[in-house]
Image: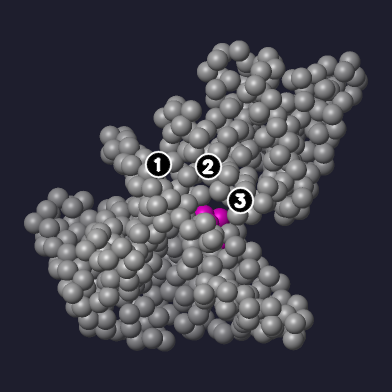
Amino acid sequence: NARKMAERTLKINLLNFGELHPRVADSHIIVARVMSRQQQSRECAKTLSKALDIRRKTQGEGHLDTMHTYSRLAFALRGQGKLDESKTLYEKALGDMLTILGHEHPLVAAVYYNLAQILHQCGTPKKALAMYRKSLDIRLVVLGADHPDVGMSYMRIATILAELRSCAIAREIYQRALAIQTKMLGMYHPYVALSYMRMALSLEKENEMEEANKARNQALVIKEIHLRKKSRKDLIFGLTKIASDLNLERSFDLAAELYQWIIEIHQMDEEDPPGARDEIGLAVAYSNYAEILWNASTSTSKEQQQRDEKFLKVKPLCLLAIELHMKNKNPSKKFHPNLPLTYHRLGTWYYRMDLLDQATIIFQSELDTKAKEFGTDHMELLTALSGLCSVLKHELDVKGDNECYAYRGSASCIVMNSREDDHLKQLKSLCIRTVSILEKSKVESPSRLALAKMDLANMLKDEGNFADSERMYHDAISLLLQEESECEFELVAAYIGLSRVLRFRAQFRASKAVSETILQLWTKVADT
């Protein structure tokens, strides 16, 4: 209902004011907020991009609303894992804010804080620590020593110090943060529980298990009190938001613990009548918990045995989520955005376990679900097509009747010199469909379309269609040259493919010229 009302308001404002008006930008931002609540991060970022474009054209770069919109879009991109883009936007917002607002302003402190979170995610804790301290210095001056935001700054600083093994200092700062949070938020606020959990992890690193257990027990007490005091819905929303932030900052153990709480709270609904149960909410919680465990299984900070244990738990959680989604499916309504995400995660799990038949079924389910919702030529289909391409390529590898040359591609690896069988026909069909979707969608990143065309070029070369293969390689190279500084390796791969096709066509002089270009590119890459 909120989404419909927000979109209706946007349409009215577009009719009344036209596309370029600050009120239309405001409406785009409201729609984006609803999308964010619905965990539709891509749509949220696209909508905020429209709002930013309007702000820049109507209010200018130095306007406070424009700076706010830069920050909003940066936050949305961070949620998608696009850390470099997010960092660039935050730095742009910070530069404008420092010029317009000066150094001692709460908004400047907030941008420093957000930049620190990104640097922490990027694996540069010392740089993140410096940013957090800048944010803290400003907040102490403009907000006062007892403000909750000051407590959060202390908490983040303590977390990084614990990671850097400065455990004694970290414990002292944790206690300072807890004192502020307890005073300003109350003894039983969820953020106080989170602080106790962070402190417990830090104490466990020091092998002070008795103190760690006390801190963890205090967090559990807060949870139990909240279950009695607050509505389950409010508590779930608050805990989910905290767990999402923890996932972004790669605090996977804490995030996993919070999702266990969330699932426990959802399961209390089993005593309610069927119509009152939030089974879709429970499905989303299972899926999000699976995502946390998946991320933890790829973390290099864990022992291999711990990573394997977490990875094996992903499958049953995804199956539970899908079962609940399908049980509560309403043919007259759109699917929940979490369903295709869960399909893709489960399909990738099967793929990594070499269970290729199951992976194909799940990726196809993802594709069918998205095609029914968005149509057959929508960008949303690309992740499912990518999964199916990967499975087909792997099956061809397993047969042992092909040679595989791989580069960093968008949809699949490249299969070469394999006999024309059903798998190859399917793979070619998927490559053609991927290129078609990208061309119709007018994708902003030329390299994405270029890589898909390289996939197709290799397929065409393998079946002896050298003329079309050469054309595809030329298209890919033209696209990659638009982003040459960021796509040097991909450009080399495209030139290598083109050189081979030219040799097959007996155009040896042209092939030699392309080879010389490859050498020049490799020299440039080596120099940098």
State the CA–CA distance, disc 1 to disc 3.
33 Å
172 w.r.t. 405: above or below: below
Local secondary structure at mark 3: helix
Percent coordinates x, y for residue 151 in the rendering: 31, 75
**Label number found at residue 298:** 1
Answer left or right for 250 relative to 86.
left
Residue at image mark 3 = 372
Q: Crowdedness of circle 2 by 10 Å Cα count: few (<14), some, many (20+)?
A: some
Q: Nearer the viewer, residue 340 or 177?
A: 340
| Tag in front: 2 or 1 | 2
Q: Is residue 450 at least partly visible in the picture? A: yes
Q: Crowdedness of circle 1 by 10 Å Cα count: few (<14), some, many (20+)?
A: some
Query: Residue 147, located in which quarter of the rendered image?
Result: bottom left
Percent coordinates x, y for residue 2 in the rendering: 52, 76
* Residue type, mark 2 in image: Ser
* Residue type, mark 3 in image: Lys
Residue at image mark 2 = 365
Percent coordinates x, y for residue 443 in the rendering: 72, 52
398 w.r.t. 353: above or below: above
Percent coordinates x, y for residue 18 in the rendering: 77, 81
- Residue reaching furthest left? 210
Question: Residue visible at 84% across and 17% down?
Answer: 503
Assess whether residue 81 is covered by the magenta stretch.
yes
| Tag in front: 1 or 3 | 3
* Disc 1 to disc 3: CB gap under 8 Å: no
**Label number found at residue 337:** none
State the CA–CA distance, disc 2 to disc 1.
25 Å
Assess whether residue 107 is covered by the magenta stretch.
no
| Quadrant containing the C terminus in the rendered view | top right
Q: Which residues are magenta?
A: 77-82
